[in-house]
Amino acid sequence: MDRLLRAGSASRITKAEQEEQDIKQSRRKHSPSFKAKVALEALKGEETTAELSSRFEVHPSQIRVWRKALAKGAAGIFGDDRDQKKKDDEGLIAQLYQQIGQLKVERDFLESRLGC
């Protein structure tokens, strides 16, 4: 009889542990606006990471990652990336015009040689 009680309680613990593990394995997906909100709060520095973690129910290390990403990408908002892209585009356009010119010269040369 005592053995049956132990076996029954062991299966209950296993079920409870299984439910807890299922809950832990489900991942939450946060929207970009939520991430930005949390990262901005972290950058303000009015609350500690631990306080923000409990307030937003997010792990502290995740808050640090979002804060670093926001700080790193903030310069792009004000045009640094746009200026670089514009320079890259201008370089590509110049290269393409050079190729067009070279192809025209080759075509003209071949026309004169073939007498077309």
Image: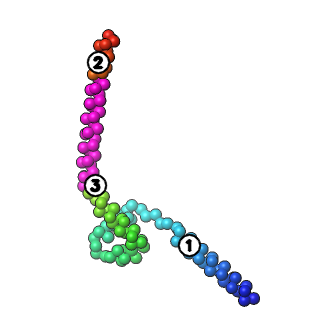
Amino acid found under the numbered disc labelled 1: Gln
Q: Is residue 26 above or below residue 48?
A: above
- Which of marks 1 and 2 precedes in the sequence? 1
Residue 22 located left or right of residue 114: right
Q: Is residue 21 above or below residue 2?
A: above
Q: Residue furthest top?
A: 115
Please tell me the numbered disc located at residue 76.
Answer: 3
Stretch in magenta: 77-104
Residue 114 lies in the magenta stretch: no
Q: Which residue is mark 1?
A: 21
Please tell me the numbered disc located at residue 108.
Answer: 2
Tell me the quarter of the image containing the N terminus. bottom right
Tell me the quarter of the image containing the C terminus. top left
Amino acid found under the numbered disc labelled 2: Asp
Q: CA distance from mark 3 to mark 2?
A: 46 Å
Q: Which residue is nearer to you in this view: 85 or 40?
A: 85
